[in-house]
Structures are given as structure tokens and as C-alpha cells.
Image (cartoon, helix red, strand yellow):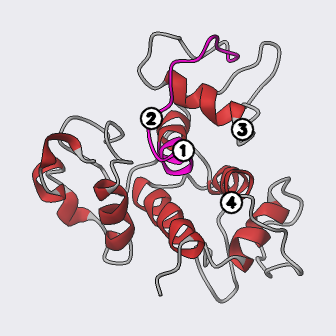
């Protein structure tokens, strides 16, 4: 449930900056309490700003688990301080098999890095168990990417349309914005729970 029971406009002073195409997703995730604590600063969502890896961990875990995780017994990532409020979400994301981190030696999560669109695809495919695509989607900018199969799967599942058409592009290296992250999660929730 959203903080303080206020409507989205009362919590995020920049809600009017959300693109029309992303408004349903942002509103849905807000109403589910998924966006609590993941704004760019107090009272602002910064919808067109990049979502960080820790922010996306919070969002995905809340969607997958339907709430907030318990504190873990330990932490596997050297760059995630146990005392940070969101550390338990990163640990839970790893427990769920959604992430393996960003680097090894020592194992790191890179929590403050912007999440790329390619990384987003892989996390969503792993988290929601999305089936592989029967055929490539036809994106002209994903060849050679370790995430290409997951990007195709996300497209086949109807979760993404890419970033541009003519030619079809996914823009895998671009950061995922907060509003895009909300829309992708909203689409997956809607696909998993169709209305009669």
C-alpha cells in the first residue's frame, strides 16, 4: 500500500511528468506499494530518470513476493552494506535466481549503477520464468549481446515493443527509466493475471 494513504499526485510532485504511455504502469505499481522508497528524492519520482540496480531489485522483489522480504541471515555482495534499508531486496533477488551480480572477485551487485535495458530484460525473464522465444524478434541492435535471447523472449511475451521501429531497435545499452521499469512490470503482472 502506498505510504501515508495519499494519492500518487500527493506523493510524487512530478507525477504529471510521467509519459501518457507509462501512466497506467506507474499508477498500478504505486497502488501496489511497489514504488515506495524508490523515487529519485523525497517527493519526486523522476520518471524519465534511470532506475538503479538496487531500485529495480526493490521493485521486482515486491512484485514477485507480494511484499517486503525479511532480513537475510547474510549478504553475498561485497558492495551492498547490510545496514542499508534496500540490502535485503538485493539479497532476495539473488535468492530468487534473478541476479548473479555484476562482477566477481569479490562478488558485487553494482547497486548504484543504472540498469540497462538489456539487463532489465534478463532480470524479468529470470524472475517471471518467461519462456524462450520461438524465433528472434528481429531487433537490429541486439546481435552478439548475452541478453539477446532474453530480449527476444520479453518481446514474444508482449512485455516490450523495443525502443524504436523502422528498423526495430531495443536500445540494449541505454538505461531503463523508472517509468519504463514500471510499465514493463505492469505488463508482466497483467499478462500473468488477465482480467475476465
Report the residue marked by disc 1: 65
Q: Write down the region rendered in magenta.
A: 59-77
8 vs 74: above or below: below
Q: Is residue 102 visible?
A: yes
Report the residue marked by disc 3: 99
Question: Which of the two discs, 3 and 1, sits closer to the camera?
Answer: 1
Q: Residue at x 84, y 57 (%)?
A: 145
Q: Residue at x 33, y 48 (%)?
A: 33
Residue 76 appears in which quarter of the rendering? top right
N-terminal label among 4 and 3: 3
Alpha carbons under labels 4 and 3: distance apart: 17 Å
Question: Which of the two discs, 4 and 3, sits closer to the camera?
Answer: 3
Q: Position of residue 18 (x, y in %)?
A: 29, 65
Alpha carbons under labels 1 and 4: distance apart: 27 Å
Report the residue marked by disc 2: 68
Nearer to the camera, 186 or 168: 186
Q: Give the crowd class for mark 4: few <14, some 14-19, many >=20 residues within 10 Å.
A: many
Amino acid at each position: 500500500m502506498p505510504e501515508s494513504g495519499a494519492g500518487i499526485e500527493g506523493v510524487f510532485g512530478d507525477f504529471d511528468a510521467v509519459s501518457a504511455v507509462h501512466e497506467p504502469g506507474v499508477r498500478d505499481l504505486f497502488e501496489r506499494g511497489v514504488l515506495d522508497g524508490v523515487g529519485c528524492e523525497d517527493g519526486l519520482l523522476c520518471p524519465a530518470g534511470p532506475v538503479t540496480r538496487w531500485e529495480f531489485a526493490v521493485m521486482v522483489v515486491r512484485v514477485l513476493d507480494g511484499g517486503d522480504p525479511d532480513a537475510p541471515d547474510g549478504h553475498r555482495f561485497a558492495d551492498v552494506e547490510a545496514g542499508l534499508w534496500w540490502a535485503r531486496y538485493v539479497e532476495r533477488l539473488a535468492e530468487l535466481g534473478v541476479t548473479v551480480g555484476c562482477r566477481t572477485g569479490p562478488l558485487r551487485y553494482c547497486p548504484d549503477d543504472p540498469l540497462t535495458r538489456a539487463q532489465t530484460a534478463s532480470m524479468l525473464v529470470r524472475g517471471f520464468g518467461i519462456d524462450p522465444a520461438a524465433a528472434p524478434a528481429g531487433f537490429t541492435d541486439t546481435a552478439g549481446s548475452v541478453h539477446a535471447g532474453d530480449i527476444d523472449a520479453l518481446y514474444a511475451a508482449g512485455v516490450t515493443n523495443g525502443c524504436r521501429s523502422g528498423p526495430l531497435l531495443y536500445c540494449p545499452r541505454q538505461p531503463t527509466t523508472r517509468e519504463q521499469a514500471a510499465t514493463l512490470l505492469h505488463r508482466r503482472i497483467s499478462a500473468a493475471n488477465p482480467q475476465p
